[in-house]
Amino acid sequence: MALHKSMKLAFVWIGVAFVALIAATVVTIRYASEGYTGPIEKGYYEKGLNYEKSILEQKKMIAEGYSYESELFSSPQDVRKGKNTFLIRFQKSGRPVVGAKLNILLERAATDEWNRSISLIEYPKDSGNYHGSVEIPEEGLWIFNLQGETEGRILQKTVEVKIQ
């Protein structure tokens, strides 16, 4: 018993649909693997495991009086496209924290193309005052993650800045 002409046509269309589906899958996989950047955050697994511990550490440091002061944290921020210079005061109960390591991790929410790490320098005359500069290449929303390490402990502060 032979198949009717309409059944043969239906099977041909089903075959065409499967070939199109496979071709679309191959193109999608190829496109996705060309632009894959890998994990943006190094040590993300360990950070996830220690997430609660780091939150408790942040709360302890704030309770002990650790804080940052900067125009970067005021509203509105005076950050513009181009070169910007920052002064950040790292304090504990109003007294300067000397000899700390401060870094600003600069990033965009949608891409890792612009991610930068800026080390801040403490000048000997300005104990507790840390200076650094960064080039902002384009307008939009930027995320500044400030990390200050002292005595093996890290205080973090994050601020979102809209550059216009």
Image (cartoon, rainbow, N blue to C red):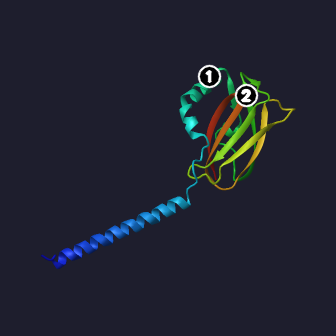
Seen at 56% across and 59% down, the residue is 35
Residue 126 in picture, x, y percent from top left: 84, 32
**Residue 56 picture quarter:** top right
- Nearest to the eye among marks 1 and 2: give it: 2
Label 2 element class: strand
* Residue 126 shown left or right of residue 113 in the figure: right
Label 2 crowd (10 A; few <14 / some 14-19 / many >=20): some
Residue sitting nearer the eye, 34 or 164: 34
Seen at 67% across and 37% down, the residue is 146
Amino acid tagged 1: Lys
Of mark 1 and mark 2, the one earlier in the sequence is 1
Outermost residue toward the bottom in this view: 5
Q: Quadrant of the N terminus?
A: bottom left
Amino acid tagged 2: Thr
Q: CA distance from mark 1 to mark 2?
A: 14 Å
Outermost residue toward the front in this view: 1
Residue 141 in picture, x, y percent from top left: 60, 49
**Residue 125 picture quarter:** top right
Residue 14 in picture, x, y percent from top left: 28, 70
Q: Which residue is mark 2?
A: 150
Residue sitting nearer the eye, 124 or 42: 42
Label 1 crowd (10 A; few <14 / some 14-19 / many >=20): few
Label 1 element class: helix
Taking 128 as reference, is 12 above or below it?
Answer: below
* Residue 23 shown left or right of residue 160 in the figure: left
Q: Which residue is mark 1?
A: 60
Of the numbered discs in the image, which one, if any, rests on residue 5? Answer: none
Residue 81 in picture, x, y percent from top left: 69, 53
Seen at 75% across and 41% down, the residue is 119
* Residue 164 shown left or right of residue 86 in the figure: left
Seen at 76% across and 31% down, the residue is 100
